Image (spheres, rainbow, N blue to C red):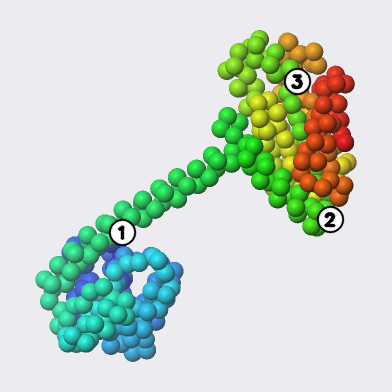
Amino acid sequence: MKILVIDDSKAIRMLVAECVKELGHHVIHAENGAEGLEFIRSNDVDLVMMDIEMPGLNGFETTQAIRSLKGDDWFPIIFLTIKTDDDSYAACIRAGGDAYLAKPISPKRLEMQIVAMERIYEMRRKLHAVQRDLIHANEALSFASLHDQLTGIANRRNFDTTLLREFNHARRDKQPLSLLMCDIDYFKVYNDRYGHMAGDDCLKKVAEAIASVPQRATDLACRYGGEEFAVIMPNTDWQVGRDLAEKIRSAVSARQIPHEGSKADSYVSLSLGLATYNGQFKNIDELMKASDDALYRAKEKGRNRLESA
């Protein structure tokens, strides 16, 4: 444990330090409450042993300041005092202390008090480990709930939530919002010819290519479902949206994933439909329909191309 001893008596500090070191713990000294509080402000401690009567901040005031500063980060505080009456003991506990050791200090009682605190330290350490694991598990669960398991990019749920939010922002701020829908050309043929494992690998590579193009943190590449992908581009006008869409189409073609069954290209390619909101759509359904209609026209015209609303 890292044990902070706050006492204006050097003799007391040395006595406590000797017992602490014999038990294999690390001791830090502070001569008064303000000095101890300053150390705690920027350092972690596992146990504080503190005199009550000190110049400046007394033990009660220092304890209250520590508890206020550290919030839920609790660690035990043991008061060292010459006062042994019941009222003084009650005042120590109410001030935020956890134990009470009378002066003159008995080295044996001090040692046993620290041994008792070791048990609390171990429980506290295990609790922190469990809390860290829980935080990591929640982060992983949150990520999994918003990302496609196969490709790692945003999933349909993420798409729905993000598009609604960005559409509302665009309508409120009178800013453009571009939506790109993409479909892998003849993907069923690809699966039939190469098998579903190769199909999954193809989806991963296409997702990587699509996600590699948008550079802004606000842009979101998603797997919409099956072999269909989408890219949400906030504050993006029609021309910039077209430029990004063509870059995405080129990025997928550049991967040169063989597709012998395709009638659009000898490599895996995309058909894309772009729609840009400039106040003309009442809701996201209209925006999505415009993008879907553009995608349908791209397929009708031979695929491996971009059409826009």
Q: Quadrant of residue 174?
A: bottom right
Closer to the chain start, of discs 3 and 2, is: 2
Q: Residues within 10 Å of mark 2 (few under 14, many from 20)?
A: few
Q: Which element type, helix, strand or loop, lies under badge 1?
A: helix
Q: Quadrant of residue 103?
A: bottom left
Q: Which residue is mark 1?
A: 124
Distance from the alpha carbon under mark 1 to that under mark 3: 57 Å
What amino acid is at disc 1? Arg
What amino acid is at disc 3? Asp
Q: Nearer the viewer, mark 1 or mark 3?
A: 3
In the rendered view, would you say 215 is above or below 73?
A: above
Q: Residues within 10 Å of mark 1 (few under 14, many from 20)?
A: some
Closer to the chain start, of discs 2 and 1, is: 1
Q: Which residue is mark 2?
A: 174
Say the numbered circle drawn on residue 175: none
Q: Nearer the viewer, mark 2 or mark 1?
A: 2
What amino acid is at disc 2? Lys
Closer to the chain start, of discs 1 and 3, is: 1
Q: Which element type, helix, strand or loop, lies under badge 3?
A: loop
Whether residue 215 can be seen here:
no
Q: Which element type, helix, strand or loop, lies under badge 2?
A: loop
Q: Residues within 10 Å of mark 3 (few under 14, many from 20)?
A: many
Q: Residue at x 26, y 81 (%)?
A: 92
Q: Residue at x 60, y 13 (%)?
A: 195
In the rendered view, would you say 140 is above or below 12?
A: above
Whether residue 46 can be seen here:
yes
Foreground residue among 247 and 28:
247
In the rendered view, would you say 166 is above or below 23?
A: above
Query: Taking 103 as reference, is 1 left or right?
Result: right
Q: Residue at x 47, y 47 (%)?
A: 138
